[in-house]
Image (cartoon, grey):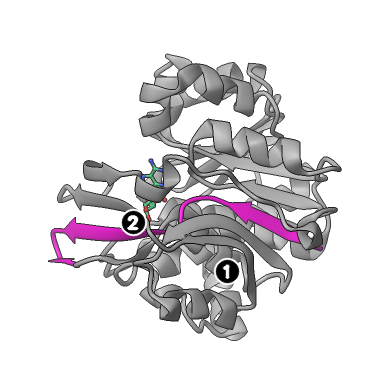
């Protein structure tokens, strides 16, 4: 089933306690597209880059069968640039630079061939552009999943709330959930956010896994305790890509299937953090993904008889 992905395609410069990169390919839509490409071969990208963006990086997406017909190239402008520095625990980071550049006036164009998509992933981007993307699809997709970040809560809270009201699943991290809801308890935060519109709320907790909440139903997927984690950049987007990619592949948007999608999303994110940038998401084998998903299942599966 076809999946449309909108979001940033960017240059990132990352610093973690374990190393530093110059400008490398990044962006929410990059991570989402790569991760979801392992589940469906029908991934359609909507994004914008400047003339400085290497053709080889666009080729990389195409090599993962991502359709780039909706990727605009503004030859005379610069690509979006983000730079971040992680603290020692890797769960928190400081944004050092956000240069919107080409994203500042991004007008998302939806190619005709993308119309009729069943799944829409709104990756991190201005909420106005996310909303425009929904409005420009002639038919509402079967499932709309949205990601966002504190940056947009700080500068565009009202448009953000308008967009949140239009989606089915909101996927954000714990700190953002607290900021958006004004609640410290994540269980309460999920309720407050759900009241804004989305039937499902996913709260990502970095190395502490992810929580899926819908009404009174709850599911928790752990993160895999990895021996070596180098760079968490894009882990949340990769998680979202695995999540929606799995749903698109299995064509089932029930709560039970979302639980499985949470496991696959977590499995994909666990690859992402093992190297810098997108490096570990390139050229993965299907068997590696299955083995990784199995590790998650083994991590939490236990037979237990309740004692009387
Ligand atoms: P994550 O680590 O999952 O939060 O995602 C990091 C990615 O988000 C990086 O590759 C950045 O290029 C991208 N990013 C950071 N800030 C923004 C923003 N304000 N809008 C869109 N994308 C962003």
Residue pointed to by mark 2: 78
Vertical position of residue 127 compared to residue 262: above or below: above
Q: Distance between the residues labelled 1 and 2?
A: 38 Å
Q: Residue at x 62, y 61 (%)?
A: 45
Q: Which residue is drawn at 60% across and 19% down?
A: 191
Q: Give me the residue at 30% from left, 53% from top.
A: 81
The answer to whether residue 212 is seen in the rendering is no
- In the image, residue 266 above or below residue 219: below
Q: Position of residue 54 (x, y in %)?
A: 38, 74
Q: Is 297 in front, or is 280?
A: 280
Quadrant (top left/top right/bottom left/bottom right) for the N terminus: bottom right
Toward the front, the furthest residue is 76
Q: Foreground residue, 245 or 54?
A: 54
Identify the secondary structure beneath mark 1. Answer: helix
The mark nearer the N terminus, 1 or 2, is 2
Residue underneath mark 1: 293
**In the image, residue 231 lies at what x, y percent?**
28, 62
Residue 32 lies in magenta, yes or no?
no
Magenta segment, prevailing SS (helix, strand or loop): strand
Residue 14 within the magenta-colored segment of the rendering = yes
Q: Please provide percent x and percent y for residue 200.
A: 67, 34
Picture quadrant where residue 127 is located: top right
Q: Where does the magenta region start and end? A: 1-21
For residue 24, side relative to residue 33 (left or right): left
Expressed as whole percent of the image width and height from the top left, the position of residue 30 reads 49, 62
Q: Dot 2 surroundings within 10 Å: few (below 14), some, or many (20 or more)?
A: many
Q: Which mark is residue 247?
A: none
Q: Which residue is drawn at 61% across and 76% down?
A: 290
């Amino acid at each position: 089933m076809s999946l449309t992905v909108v979001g940033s395609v960017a240059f990132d410069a990352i610093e973690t306690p374990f190393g530093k990169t110059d400008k490398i390919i990044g962006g929410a839509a990059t991570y989402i597209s790569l991760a979801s490409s392992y589940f469906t071969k029908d991934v359609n990208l909507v994004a914008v880059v400047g003339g400085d963006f290497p053709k080889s990086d666009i080729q990389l997406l195409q090599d993962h069968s991502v359709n780039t017909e909706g990727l605009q190239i503004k030859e005379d402008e610069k690509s979006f640039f983000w730079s971040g520095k992680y603290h020692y625990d890797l769960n928190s980071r400081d944004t050092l630079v956000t240069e919107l550049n080409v994203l500042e006036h991004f007008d998302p164009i939806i190619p005709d061939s993308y119309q009729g998509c069943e799944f829409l992933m709104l990756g991190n981007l201005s909420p106005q552009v996310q909303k425009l993307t929904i409005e420009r699809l002639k038919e509402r997709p079967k499932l709309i999943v949205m990601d966002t970040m504190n940056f947009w809560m700080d500068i565009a809270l009202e448009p953000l709330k308008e967009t949140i009201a239009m989606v089915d699943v909101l996927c954000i991290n714990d700190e953002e959930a607290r900021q958006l809801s004004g609640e410290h308890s994540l269980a309460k935060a999920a309720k407050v956010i759900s009241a804004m519109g989305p039937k499902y709320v996913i709260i990502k907790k970095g190395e502490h896994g992810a929580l899926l909440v819908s009404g009174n139903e709850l599911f928790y997927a752990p993160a895999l305790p990895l021996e070596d984690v180098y760079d968490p950049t894009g882990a949340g987007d990769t998680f979202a890509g695995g999540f929606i990619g799995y749903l698109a592949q299995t064509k089932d948007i029930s709560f039970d299937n979302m639980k499985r999608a949470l496991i696959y999303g977590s499995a994909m994110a666990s690859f992402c953090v093992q190297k810098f940038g997108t490096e570990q998401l390139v050229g993965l084998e299907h068997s590696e993904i299955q083995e990784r998903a199995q590790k998650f299942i083994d991590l939490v599966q236990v037979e237990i008889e309740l004692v009387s």
